[in-house]
Image (cartoon, rainbow, N blue to C red):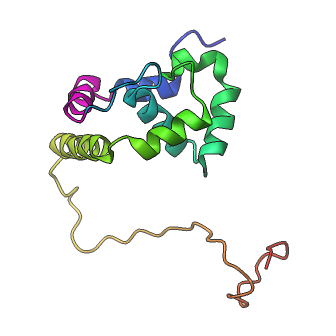
């Protein structure tokens, strides 16, 4: 049995929380908040992004499935759909925008400036399948179970 930290906790441990807290206090993000802080909101949204959740309801289903581990994953005890939806609606996006910009600057400063010794153009191919509506894209019949 694993006795170490969860992978998600190890990833989020790398995020500078003091910088985030300064941005939250600058924008009064945790004003009138008891349990579901901006940091909890960020952890939920990062978890949803990493795990590929498609909606808040989908995200909450996964979080509720891991409710006994919520403290160790970095979530608060009171993660509910209404809390998360209200937080996303009411809290200033500037907190998260500034934090994302800070992380981008931090990542760029740590990146290697070398060009890996590659001369010329580099092409990247993405093989992701994109779902198309057969009613509009009639020629995309690679799958027979696709709804119209």
Asked if residue 100 is positioned above or below residue 121 in the image, the reply reads above
The residue positioned 68% from the left and 87% from the top of the image is 137
Considering every residue shown, the one lying at the far right of the view is: 144
Instruction: Name the spot of residue 51 as percent of width and height, x first.
Output: 57, 42
Which of the two residues, 122 or 59, is positioned nearer the viewer here? 59
Q: Is residue 61 left or right of residue 126?
A: right
Residue 21 highlighted magenta (yes or no): yes
Instruction: Name the spot of residue 70 as percent of width and height, x first.
Output: 57, 20
The residue positioned 32% from the left and 27% from the top of the image is 31
Residue 45 highlighted magenta (yes or no): no
Which of the two residues, 46 or 38, is positioned nearer the viewer here? 38
Q: Can the viewer see residue 24?
A: yes
The residue positioned 70% from the left and 28% from the top of the image is 65
Count of residue discs:
0
The residue positioned 67% from the left and 28% from the top of the image is 64
- The answer to which quarter of the image holds residue 15 is top left
Q: Is residue 33 left or right of residue 85?
A: left
- The answer to which quarter of the image holds residue 115 is bottom left
Q: Is residue 87 left or right of residue 123?
A: right
Instruction: Name the spot of residue 52 as percent of width and height, x first.
Output: 58, 48
Q: Is residue 72 left or right of residue 17?
A: right
Considering every residue shown, the one lying at the far front of the view is: 32
The residue range painted magenta reads 14-27
Predominant SS of the magenta segment:
helix
Instruction: Name the spot of residue 36 as percent of width and height, x first.
Output: 47, 25
Which of the two residues, 68 or 30, is positioned nearer the viewer here? 30
Task: Quarter of the image for the N terminus: give it.
Answer: top right
Asked if residue 38 is positioned above or below residue 146 in the image, the reply reads above
Q: Can the viewer see residue 47?
A: no
Task: Quarter of the image for the C terminus: give it.
Answer: bottom right
């Amino acid at each position: 049995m694993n006795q170490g930290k969860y992978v998600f906790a190890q990833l989020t441990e790398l995020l500078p929380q003091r910088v985030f807290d300064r941005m939250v206090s600058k924008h009064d993000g945790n004003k009138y908040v008891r349990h579901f802080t901006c940091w909890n909101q960020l952890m939920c949204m990062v978890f949803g992004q990493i795990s590929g959740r498609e909606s808040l309801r989908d995200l909450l289903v996964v979080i509720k499935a891991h409710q006994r581990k919520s403290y160790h994953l970095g979530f608060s005890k009171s993660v509910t759909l209404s809390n998360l939806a209200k937080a996303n609606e009411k809290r200033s996006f500037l907190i998260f925008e500034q934090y994302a910009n800070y992380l981008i600057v931090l990542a760029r400063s740590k990146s290697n400036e070398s060009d890996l010794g590659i001369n010329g153009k580099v092409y990247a191919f993405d093989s992701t399948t994109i779902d198309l509506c057969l009613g509009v894209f009639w020629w995309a019949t690679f799958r027979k179970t696709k709804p119209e």
